[in-house]
Image: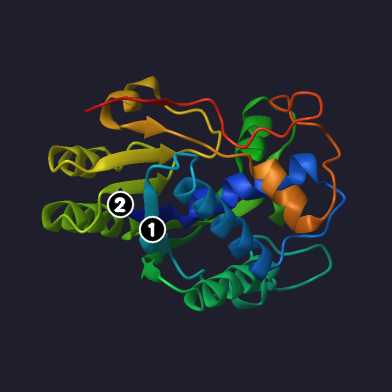
Amino acid sequence: MDIKVAVLVDASFFLKRLNFFKRRYFPSEPELTPKQVVQVLNCCIKRHLNDGNSSIYQHLYRVFYYDSPPLNIKVHYPLVNSGETNPRVLDFSKQPETIHRNEILTEVKKQRKFALRLGTIKHDKQWKLTDDALNNLLKGICKFEDLTNNDFYYSMRQKGVDIKLGVDIASIAQERLVDKIVLFAGDSDFVPAAKLARINGIDFVLDPLRNNIDPSLHEHIDGLVSYDLVSILKDILGKSPSIIPEWWSEGTRPKKAKGQRRNQ
């Protein structure tokens, strides 16, 4: 039996979870290169396509990758440093995080059967206090004159990505382009589109990358499956993790997280 599979990736969520596993289990290793990031993603996708059921051949229809190009504007810091007369300028386009994210997008564009779905970054042209700084002020631990530029962050948010993801799921479902959808995400924004996909007979699998999800999401999906990112990172980096994951038993490297599958 052959089935077609569409894979949808919430890039912000995927990169956040990937960085979490990298920092926790491989803290001494350098930052993952854009090529390594895409390698990890491709490995996760292959694990889903080869899930151990030899009677079913799953072939990839397309990977939809949802992200927004990072901000590339220049802004002034909110505070003037001691001994200076004007606030310094922050050039987002030269920040390591911006350069790295753009390089990942460039690498994604090179991948076969990858479709890039880009939203935008909106900003309110204002700086806001970090939660720690605000709590310290409210508790009287520090005074306003003690604040530095490190206590502020530039307010921005991603727009348009969730809409594109929902529209793509709806289009795939209505036209029955695939038999199965695998979504890498961790929130509930996809639920209305997932309902439509399941109504149209599409198997809908959520991969939260071992992140905890709201229990209510279980009723809107057909399967919850996460594969072992630490094992994948170990193979790509060629190094053993500094901390052994709690889900690894002695001498084994389980590939799949505990999950469940239900018939619609």
Residue depicted at 75% across the width and 24% down the height? 249
Of helix, strand and loop, which one carries label 2? strand
Counting the numbered discs, the total is 2
Q: How is the image coloured?
A: rainbow
What residue is pinned by disc 1?
Answer: 59
Asked whether the beta carbons under mark 2 and mark 1 sit within 8 Å of each other, the answer is yes
Of helix, strand and loop, which one carries label 1? strand
In this orientation, does residue 21 appear? no
Q: Position of residue 143 (x, y in %)?
A: 72, 38
What residue is pinned by disc 2?
Answer: 3
- Residue flagged by tag 2: what amino acid is it? Ile
Residue depicted at 56% across the width and 30% down the height? 257
**Is 91 placed left or right of 124 in the picture?**
right
Q: Position of residue 96 (x, y in %)?
A: 70, 69
The mark that comes first in sequence, 2 or 1, is 2
- Compute the Cα span from label 2 to label 1: 6 Å
Residue depicted at 87% across the width and 50% down the height? 28
- Residue flagged by tag 1: what amino acid is it? His
- Determine whether 41 is above or below 256 in the image: below
Q: Position of residue 110 (x, y in %)?
A: 51, 78
Q: Quadrant of residue 192?
A: top left
Closest to the observer: 16 or 230? 230
In this orientation, does residue 46 appear? yes
**Is 220 placed left or right of 117 in the picture?**
left
- Determine whether 18 is above or below 260 in the image: below
**Is 57 placed left or right of 128 in the picture?**
left
Residue depicted at 64% across the width and 44% down the height? 229
